[in-house]
Amino acid sequence: MVGELDDPRRHEPEGELAERQMLEEWLEYHRTTLLLKCEGLSDEERKRRPVTSSHLSLHGLVRHMAEVERAWFEAVLENSDPDFPNIWATPDVEDSELVPLDGAGWVEDLAIWQAQCETSRQIAAGRELDETGQGRDQRISLRWIYVHMIEEYARHNGHADLIRELIDGSVGM
């Protein structure tokens, strides 16, 4: 299969891990998948929105996931502040982290996403799975955040897979 994602940086977690390790490894698997989907393309290709009815691009997905990492780990779990400031998103403008990308720099935005992932790892490392932070209308546990983040990355990695296939024919998750 052209472009199959066989890379030593990405491995599927074993089937009998302890709960925390399994959650952390699946989240890393999906973070790495998004990175791999973006590699080997030009800046223009990463910004391309091949589904014209959608704001989604690979570059935009990386920015979106940086916002999601920040919202759940930093804003909710660490600060318990649902109004914690965004990186790019404007609260009253839907998908504002996704578009426009005209002036967005890939190297800078990738570094921000990677730094946000590292911040998320550090915040989670010192907490138990049952520890909570304050969401908009309820307490949210680290366990819930891990499951949600896995779901969020998996969903957007499906988008990334389709976008990448439409850009250069590469397929495979």
Image (spheres, rainbow, N blue to C red):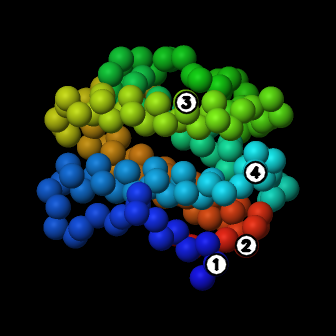
Earlier in the chain: of badge 2 and badge 4, it is 4
Task: Give x and y (percent) for residue 20.
Answer: 20, 49
Earlier in the chain: of badge 1 and badge 2, it is 1
Judging by the rendered image, the residue that carries numbered circle 3 is 112
Earlier in the chain: of badge 3 and badge 2, it is 3
Q: CA distance from mark 1 to mark 4?
A: 18 Å
Side of 38 relative to 41 (left or right)? left
Task: Give x and y (percent) for residue 143.
Answer: 26, 43
Question: Is 16 placed above or below 145 here?
Answer: below
Q: Residues within 10 Å of mark 1 (few under 14, many from 20)?
A: few
CB of mark 1 within 8 Å of CB of mark 2? yes
| Residue 39 sits in quarter | bottom right
CB of mark 3 within 8 Å of CB of mark 1? no
The residue sitting at 67% across, 50% down in the picture is 58
Q: Give the SS element for disc 1.
A: loop
Q: Is residue 55 visible?
A: no
Name the residue type under label 1. Val
The residue sitting at 63% across, 30% down in the picture is 108
Q: Give the SS element for disc 3.
A: helix
Task: Give x and y (percent) for residue 19.
Answer: 18, 54
Name the residue type under label 2. Gly
The residue sitting at 66% across, 57% down in the picture is 40
